Image: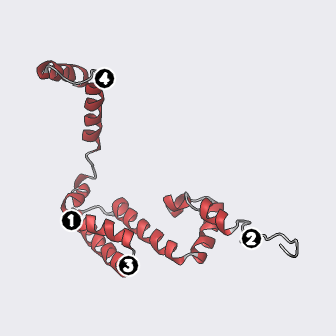
Amino acid sequence: KAKNSTCSPKEFSNGDTRKQLLARSRYLLYKAPSNWTESQYCRSKILFDQYPDIKIAFDLTQGLRNIFNTAKTIEVAYTKLAHWYKDVENTGFKAFNTIANTITLNYRSILNYFINRSTNASAESFNAKIKAFRAQFRGVRNVEFFLFRLTTIFA
């Protein structure tokens, strides 16, 4: 203030400031690197150089994503999940410990996904339709008639 000069933040090679880099890098972290654009690839290199912890967390996330995309059998998936769990323990990130503990507690049902690579999404969708149908008529007075309506409409 005494010198009447403006303070301009440091810019990286792509023209982003630190604040812009963090804000604009948010969506590239949701994508796989194969789906990045050229500018996202450049931004990721700068981001991972400046913040190595984000790189480690991103690699863990991609590792888990790759397990579900590439494992063909339960045995392979079980082995890969065990290695991923060990990597999570080595990093010490508390957020990933939550996911790792969830996988540890529910690994049998999670591994069932690899039998025929299906989820219960269709059942959840049908339950949502039933809930919406019930809400549309403000509840159910006659259960038999409600079930008749459901079978007529959704069967």
Q: Which quadrant of the structure image shows residue 40? A: bottom right
Whole-number angstrom distance, CA of label 2 to CA of label 3: 32 Å
Whole-number angstrom distance, CA of label 4 to CA of label 1: 38 Å
Please tell me whether residue 151 is drawn above or below residue 59 in the rendered image. Answer: above
Q: Which residue is mark 4?
A: 136
Please tell me whether residue 90 is drawn above or below residue 147 in the rendered image. Answer: below
Q: Which quadrant of the structure image shows residue 113? A: bottom left
Q: Which residue is mark 2?
A: 9
Q: Nearer the viewer, mark 4 or mark 1?
A: 4
Q: Amino acid at mark 3?
A: Gly
The residue carrying pointer 2 sits among few (fewer than 14), some (14 to 19) or many (20 or more) residues within 10 Å by Cα, namely few
First in residue order: circle 2 vs circle 3: 2
* CB-based contact (under 8 Å), mark 1 and mark 3: no
Q: Which residue is mark 1?
A: 105
The residue carrying pointer 4 sits among few (fewer than 14), some (14 to 19) or many (20 or more) residues within 10 Å by Cα, namely few
Q: Say which of 39 and 105 sits in front.
A: 105
The x and y percentages for residue 150 are 21, 23
In this rendering, position of residue 65 left or right of residue 139: right
First in residue order: circle 4 vs circle 2: 2
Q: Amino acid at mark 1?
A: Leu
Q: For numbered disc 2, what is the local secondary structure?
A: loop
Q: For numbered disc 4, what is the local secondary structure?
A: helix
Q: Which residue is mark 3?
A: 92
The x and y percentages for residue 104 are 23, 68
Q: For numbered disc 3, what is the local secondary structure?
A: loop
Whole-number angstrom distance, CA of label 3 to CA of label 4: 48 Å
Q: Amino acid at mark 4?
A: Gln
Give the quadrant of the N terminus: bottom right
Residue placed farthest to the right in the image? Answer: 3
The residue carrying pointer 1 sits among few (fewer than 14), some (14 to 19) or many (20 or more) residues within 10 Å by Cα, namely few
First in residue order: circle 1 vs circle 3: 3
